[in-house]
Image (spheres, grey):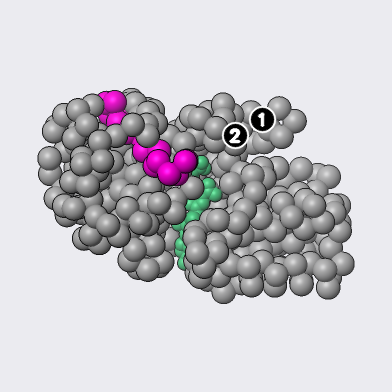
Amino acid sequence: MNTLSVNLGERSYPIHIGSGLCTQAALIPEKLLKGKIVVITNDTVAPLYLESVLSGLRARGAECMPIVLPDGEAYKSWETLNRIFDELLSHRCERKTPLIALGGGVIGDLTGFAAATYQRGVPFIQIPTTLLSQVDSAVGGKTAINHPLGKNMIGAFYQPQVVIADMDTLRTLPPRELAAGLAEVIKYGFIRDAEFLDWLEKNIDRLIALEPEALAFAVERSCQNKADVVAGDERETGERALLNFGHTFGHAIEAGMGYGAWLHGEAVSAGMVMAARFSEKLGYIGKADVQRVVDILARAKLPVAAPELGAARYLDLMGHDKKVEGGRINFILLKKPGAAFISNQYDAAALQAILSTPKQTHA
Ligand code: NAD
Ligand code: GLY
């Protein structure tokens, strides 16, 4: 097992990465295991991992209360949040009752927001079970539910006390979900870690084949990148926005195609290609750099061609993004592979051209 740290002063916390960690309640601070502890998961993950997690906790003397929710992004909602509150209140959960998120980003975001708001905040633990949640959503304290008018629109920054990433859980992950997680892994290479990008280009096939050593390295390196960014800019006033590379286009694809049609990571993949092409059009990178983005994403079995929604629809959808300030969209562009920057200074005609021909994947 390797342990990284997210350094946020008194809100610092460890990220444990390794195999067989799900059952190791010893990784949870002793003080959180004294009374009741709530494990929130869904009906896909529960049959796979809930019993192991509960037995580890019970062996340490905790009184466990599982809450099993329906699976799906559609349940990252106000109604599900209320259902969690109903259960917590009817079982007299207190201000010290920890909530454990056992699942992917949907469960993590929902449980985190419940933990941030129940009785003004209870301890929160992340046990992420998808690649995307291990390398991205479980780290950094962004929690949220969706609103019918926008994704992740109601939420809070609320850091967990510990993140436990068990590589073994990735073995049951559907290949499409694994690829979606790889999009976020590849993102770190392009935005700030050229050495990791080189490694990914050599080792992407090992990740797809779920080679344990390669997976653990990729998760660690991704978490280290995320931890560094979050430590420097917890509330996204600057550098943290770099993590949104491909996301402004990606969120428009997710919303425009109807939530659930494209996985988040798939939309981010096509979005990163659009962001790279936009960077090229604005003169920051060359054709070969764009091709590098396309090639590695295609090798990870991710979509590199965005759907044709029409420029007007893209612009309308992107206008709802949280990255909009004073009517201008903040784009994350590439200076070179391994270095991204934020800019709202762009030529509208260049953007229009990218949005009008989204299917063109080659420069
Ligand atoms: P998800 O939570 O929907 O999980 C994907 C699917 O895999 C689900 O069907 C889930 O039940 C299943 N699953 C989970 N673990 C499994 C396992 N080990 N074996 C088999 N199946 C398993 O999706 P996700 O990609 O993990 O997360 C996407 C969500 O995360 C979105 O809501 C997105 O907005 C959010 N997100 C949040 C942040 C953040 O910083 N908070 C960052 C990125 C994404
Ligand atoms: N997933 C982007 C962030 O955590 O800031």
Magenta region, main secondary structure: strand
Q: Is 230 displayed left or right of 158 in the figure? A: left
Q: Please, what secondary structure does the residue beneath circle 2 have? A: loop
Q: Secondary structure at mark 1?
A: loop
The answer to which image quadrant residue 172 occupies is bottom left
200 lies above or below 62: above
> How far across and how far down the image is residue 320, in percent?
44, 54
Is residue 335 part of the magenta span, yes or no? yes
Q: Which residues are magenta?
A: 324-338
Q: Amino acid at mark 1?
A: Leu
Rendered location of residue 165, percent (x, y): 55, 47
Cα–Cα span, label 2 and label 1: 8 Å
Residue drawn at x 43%, y 34% is 242
Which corner quadrant of the image does residue 276 belong to?
A: top left
The residue at which mark 1 appears reads as 8
The residue singled out by tag 2 in the image is 234
